[in-house]
Amino acid sequence: MRAHRLLLVAASALLVVASHIIAAQTPSVPDITGSWLRQGFTVGVPASAQASAPKAPPPAAAPAVKEPYRTEWQSRLKAIREADAKGQPLANNAVACLPDGMPGMMTAVFPMEILQSRGQITIIEEAYTQVRRILMDRPQKALDDIEPGFYGHSVGRWEGDTLIVDTIGIKENVRYQNVPHSKEMRIRERMRLVAPDMLWNEITIEDPTVLEKPWTFTFAYQRMKDYTLLEYICEDNREYADDQGFQKIRVDPAQR
Amino acid sequence: MTGRTGMLSLAVVIAVLAPVFAHHSFAVYDHTRTLTLSGTVTRFQWTNPHGFIEMDVTQSDGTVKHFSIELTSINMMQRVGWRSNMIKAGDKVQVVMAPLLSGEPVGLGLEVVLADGKTMALPVPNIGSFKRTTQE
């Protein structure tokens, strides 16, 4: 009986030692799981849900777009400005209930949730319930093996305190700030906690077909305390694009 | 002291430059005037991308005119305290709205006085760009 108890004590001690060894061998990574608010996007967010001590990232430079894409891009921006000034906005993807896709969803117009699990980091953007999966410690696929989509194919790895993510396979009609891109666009991200509750994501767009040089900009996110993402379904959109491409509102007596 | 002032100025610059971004353009609404409507709710639509208040407003000549009031995303509304049960059909409400430029009886809701007298603002991005006037 006594020997049995001794054996049990010895076995538990062994287990404790073994678990410590395993823990020591598993490199710890920063904890970025939780809800995040884009710094400055505070409309509709109570102050209690915002982290203090905001720190601003470096300002974004304009992309160096090559011709003939530059002319196309500039004339689109001009058309948008003129249409807005006339009170006749041009319809965009949102009018069709389409999500931002990458990298637009990382602007986090609404709060964003990051989930770290074994082999995968998942990012959910509340607006349009956008989801992207970052597969960890795997090689990137060949572009030909990826069907183009809104979020593309993302692989990631931790390099010290920085999460490095590589994304390819974005549909050409999925544009950030209306900047055109080719099928070969590559999005590189470097995410790092610059403070316990402040995450920076330095995004670099590479596209030798369209851009003179890589385009880099940084988004800052504040950790949100006790915020659970709400559901978002584009259930009844009364906006539509008319045959001229202008955004209109359906005035429907059936809605009354 | 200089450092502190520098930090403060930086904070001001950030606040001013904070991106005002929305998925949906509100350029279809008149930014130069608002209308204040008092009427009876026929329907409170709790949906994304935007909610709506449908309401009947009795005109000075006694006829009833129907208005649709576009709200913001219900997610943004929830984050500032709106709930789906705050308005129901039959409620008497007062709405401050920016009218549609096309003249159709539609407006963007900026502020609502609920049936119980409580005033609720709408979390419209860049709401300061809408000039308030007091036209009934």
Image (cartoon, coloured by chain):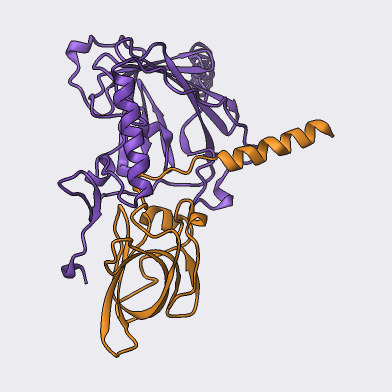
Q: Which chain is orange?
A: B
Q: Name the colour assigned to chain A in the rendering.
A: purple
Query: Which residue sits at x=49%, y=79%?
Result: B117
Q: Residue at x 43, y 78 (%)?
A: B136
The reply to whether residue A237 is visible in this rendering is: no
Viewer-proximal residue, A98 or A7? Answer: A98
Count up the numbered dots.
0
Q: Quadrant of the C terminus of chain A?
A: bottom left
The answer to which of A129 and B3 lies nearer the viewer is B3
Residue B104 on image: x %, y %:
26, 67
| Quadrant in the rendering for residue B42 | bottom left
Residue sitting at 41 percent across and 67 percent down? B97
Q: Residue A131, relative to residue A168: is it above or below?
A: below
Quadrant of residue B13 in the image?
A: top right
Q: Position of residue A206 (x, y in %)?
A: 37, 14
Q: Residue B100: horizontal and vertical position, in percent?
A: 33, 62
Q: Would you say residue A34 is visible in this rendering?
A: yes
Residue name at image x 35 percent, y 48 percent: B25
Quadrant of residue A119 within the rendered picture: top left
Q: Residue furthest right?
A: B1
